[in-house]
């Protein structure tokens, strides 16, 4: 018998009440169709990612008798009736694979909210109840990586705007946001899925599970890079009086071996470290390092400290003025802000740099909980709802229209996603030719029908989209300066 503590058992990977839902549908029910959408929320659009990881991890492996026995044991303990007959039948009729078809928009696509992203229907009328049974796991497998991916994508739009306004190097956009979130997530799986979603938009990460997930589920090749960084334990171990010696030793040790080394400058007195240790004591060591040295602040105001640090470094190392009239540190040194960042403070940081006449080139960032953990299903109001039911051979449109919340109104009828006139529109599936429907069948009866690779996700995420998809996010960057108003 399987281990009864196996939380990955698909039959138990659901809300407990789901075990009794099979008996609650109308007599004669044959097919159920459901769909997933973001009903709006923090952003006007979503970058869809994560479904393929869920399908490969959970739905391409058949259920077993042990899974059924263990789930029944748990249901009895919880006092919920269990559909043993249905599960044994599914095991015998379909070798334990779920008889469902799943359609989805190609991953990496950026779609305005309130549009269908995924649609599910059972393929065997005997098992109509299976469509919504695994809603809990499927919705979780979609909303979390898509929400992280969307936050990361919006950050990408912020840095693209900042670089366009103040830099000569817009091609560097994928380097400016490092994932520091691994220790702040709720689980290893969260780190892997959220870290993977971030890598669709940026190349930098310290969440090691992210690249591993991208490689495992999307055949990614070298999807994420890190740098040699230090932590406070190493700096403090040398004691305060030897802080400069420690930095010098690290730079000498890695000279010619790595392209980037980050120096942690706030263990004691950040301003003193920048102005006197980096700017005087080891200035020549930094200038002679054959690569880039990052001065990383890990405390203080995340919008002001990076700008102040940049100006302090310019006092010692000088600066150039780029073609757009903004000051840039010499190529041997940059500032790294790795604490206190959310989408809002990330944006505020680059606004402050521009206000002071400093190019966005000067500061690279790392985001932790604000990227991978400070979010929930309601950030983008994700939901999975039944949209059609077939009873005794007749399809019926269904939806929910609660008087208490218009946001929770769902869409009736089998759906399709159409692209025309530069925009997306959710329409009835029978209203357009099959070839115009952007929802593509990706899974049927235990088999993957399509496999997206990570390069395809990146390419889709970088396609031009109407500015309305992210205008609210970059709008505060255009309040002042001669560049505002276009």
Image: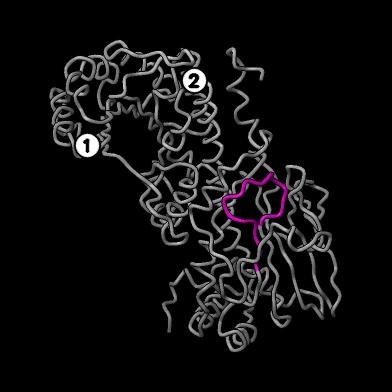
Magenta span contains residue 356: no
Quick one: quadrant of the N terminus? bottom left
Q: Which residue is mark 1?
A: 233
Residue sitting at x 49%, y 26%: 163
Label 1: state its secondary structure.
Answer: helix
Label 2: state its secondary structure.
Answer: helix
Q: Name the spot of residue 31 as percent of width and height, x first.
A: 76, 75
Numbered badge on residue 243: none
Please give left or right for residue 379 compared with residue 263 in the image. right
Do the residues bearing badges 2 and 1 touch, measured as CB atoms within 8 Å? Answer: no
Q: Nearer the viewer, residue 445 or 235?
A: 445
Q: Name the spot of residue 270 as percent of width and height, x first.
A: 29, 21
Q: For mark 2, does the 10 Å Cα neighbourhood hold few (<14), some (14 to 19), or many (20 or more) residues?
A: many
Q: Nearer the viewer, residue 474 or 85?
A: 474
Q: Name the spot of residue 427 as percent of width and height, x first.
A: 80, 55
Quick one: quadrant of the C terminus? top right
Magenta range: 102-117
Q: Name the spot of residue 90 as percent of width and height, x first.
A: 62, 84
Q: Nearer the viewer, residue 94 or 436?
A: 436
Q: Earlier in the sequence, mark 2 or mark 1?
A: 2
Q: Nearer the viewer, mark 2 or mark 1?
A: 2
Instruction: In the displayed orientation, state which residue is furthest to the top.
Output: 315
Q: Which residue is mark 2?
A: 166
Residue sitting at x 41%, y 52%: 210
Q: Nearer the viewer, residue 173 or 7?
A: 173
């Amino acid at each position: 018998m399987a281990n009864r503590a196996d939380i990955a058992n698909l039959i138990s990977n659901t809300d407990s009440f789901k075990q009794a839902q099979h008996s609650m549908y109308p007599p004669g029910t044959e097919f159920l169709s459901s769909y997933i959408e973001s009903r709006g929320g923090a952003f006007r659009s979503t970058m869809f990612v994560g479904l393929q990881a869920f399908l490969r991890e959970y739905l391409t492996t058949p259920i077993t008798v042990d899974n059924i026995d263990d789930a029944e044991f748990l249901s009895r303990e919880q006092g919920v009736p269990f559909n043993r007959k249905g599960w044994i039948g599914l095991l015998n009729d379909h070798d334990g694979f779920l008889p469902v078809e799943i359609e989805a928009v190609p991953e990496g696509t950026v779609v305005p909210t309130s549009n269908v992203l995924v649609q599910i229907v059972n393929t065997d009328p005997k098992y109509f109840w299976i469509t919504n049974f695994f809603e809990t796991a499927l919705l979780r497998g979609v909303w979390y990586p898509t929400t992280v991916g969307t936050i990361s994508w919006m950050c990408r739009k912020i840095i693209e705007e900042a670089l366009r306004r103040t830099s000569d190097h817009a091609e560097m956009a994928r380097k400016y946001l490092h994932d520091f979130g691994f220790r702040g997530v709720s689980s290893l799986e969260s780190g892997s899925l959220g870290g993977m979603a971030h890598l669709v938009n940026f190349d930098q990460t310290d969440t090691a599970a992210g690249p591993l997930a991208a490689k495992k589920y999307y055949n990614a090749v070298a999807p994420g890079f890190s740098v040699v960084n230090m932590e406070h334990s190493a700096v403090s171990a040398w004691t305060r009086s030897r802080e400069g010696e420690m930095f010098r030793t690290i730079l000498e040790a890695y000279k010619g071996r790595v392209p980037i080394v980050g120096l942690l400058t706030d263990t004691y007195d950040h301003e003193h470290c920048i102005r006197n240790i980096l700017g005087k004591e080891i200035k020549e060591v930094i200038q002679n390092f054959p690569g880039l040295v990052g001065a990383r602040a890990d405390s203080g105001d995340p919008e002001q400290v990076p700008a102040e640090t940049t100006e302090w470094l310019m006092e010692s190392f000088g600066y150039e003025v780029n073609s757009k009239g903004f000051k840039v540190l010499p190529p041997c040194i940059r500032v790294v802000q790795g604490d206190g960042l959310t989408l809002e403070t990330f944006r505020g940081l680059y606004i402050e740099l521009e206000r002071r006449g400093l190019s966005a080139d000067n500061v690279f960032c790392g985001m932790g909980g604000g990227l991978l953990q400070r979010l929930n299903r309601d950030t983008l109001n994700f939901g999975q709802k039944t949209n059609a039911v077939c009873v005794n051979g007749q399809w019926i449109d269904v939806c929910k229209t609660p008087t208490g919340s218009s946001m929770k109104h769902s869409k009736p009828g089998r759906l399709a996603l159409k692209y025309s006139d530069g925009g997306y529109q959710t329409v009835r599936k029978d209203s357009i030719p099959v070839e115009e429907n952007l929802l593509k069948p990706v899974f049927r009866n235990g088999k993957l029908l399509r496999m997206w690779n990570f390069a395809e996700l990146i390419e889709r995420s970088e396609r031009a989209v109407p500015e309305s998809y992210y205008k609210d996010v970059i709008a505060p960057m255009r309040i002042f300066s001669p560049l505002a108003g276009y």
